Image: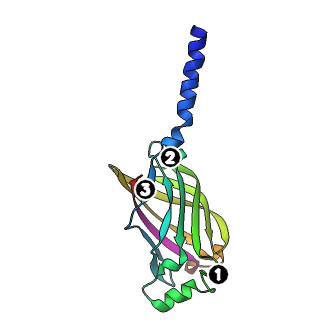
Amino acid sequence: MKKLLIPAAMAVLLAGSAFTFINSPDWAINTGFAVKFSDKNADGIFKDLKGGIIFDESNPSAAKFDVTIDVNSINTGNGLKNKHAKSAKWFDAEKYPTIHFTSTAVTKTATGYTAAGQLEMHGVKKPLTIPFTFQASGGKGSFKGSFKINRTDFGIGEAKGNDKDFTELDITVPVSSK
């Protein structure tokens, strides 16, 4: 009887751990998100962010971010700059209508978390690690992150070889549990 009890207990533990990912909270992106950018050429926001977020503070290794920004939702506050940003000289929104990030690993850090993954922009895929924090309250929460990317790594604009090549991004994503 004891010989059957130990394997049965091990099977229950193993089966329970296999469903950890499934039990991770699934978050819906709420309105009020902010995807702000600034560089030496222009400042503005992207107004359209969609995607899926699975995140549990107690199990960041099971997290998954799969988010998309509509390039045509760019708003610099200047109609001519918006048109230029969407043109073939910059984002080429007609040919590359989205910016897409998919995480491959999420880890806890001393100041929050990092999401490592692939960023696809302007037809180019590159690895990117995004530092972020998460604040939860009841069934709601907010992800916040700030980081820089070199836009010329993605074939956007001409490389100057200095800080003009970099764009600062500040992202705030309010969420609610599904």
Dot 2, how many residues are within 10 Å of its Cα: few (below 14), some (14-19), or many (20+)?
A: some
The answer to whether residue 124 is above or below residue 161 is above
Dot 3, how many residues are within 10 Å of its Cα: few (below 14), some (14-19), or many (20+)?
A: some
| Label placed on residue 60 | 2
Which residue, as the protein is rendered here, is positioned at the far top? 1
| Label placed on residue 133 | 3
- Residue range in magenta is 165-173
Query: Which residue is more in the foreground, 139 or 112?
Result: 139
Residue occupied by mark 1:
159
Residue drawn at the location 53% of the way across and 37% of the way down? 19
Which residue, as the protein is rendered here, is positioned at the far left? 138
- Which x, y percent locates residue 84? 55, 88
Q: Three-letter amino acid code at disc 2? A: Pro
* Tally of marks: 3
* Main secondary structure found in the magenta portion: strand
| Label placed on residue 117 | none
- Which x, y percent locates residue 67? 53, 63
**Which type of secondary structure does the marked residue at label 1 adopt?**
loop
- Which x, y percent locates residue 3? 61, 10
First in sequence: mark 1 or mark 3? 3
Dot 1, how many residues are within 10 Å of its Cα: few (below 14), some (14-19), or many (20+)?
A: some
Instruction: Measure how far apart labels 2 and 3 are at the Cα level.
Output: 12 Å
Instruction: Measure how far apart labels 1 and 2 are at the Cα level.
Output: 36 Å
Instruction: Measure how far apart labels 1 and 3 are at the Cα level.
Output: 31 Å
First in sequence: mark 1 or mark 2? 2
Q: Nearer the viewer, mark 2 or mark 3?
A: 2
**Which type of secondary structure does the marked residue at label 3 adopt?**
strand
**Which type of secondary structure does the marked residue at label 2 adopt?**
helix
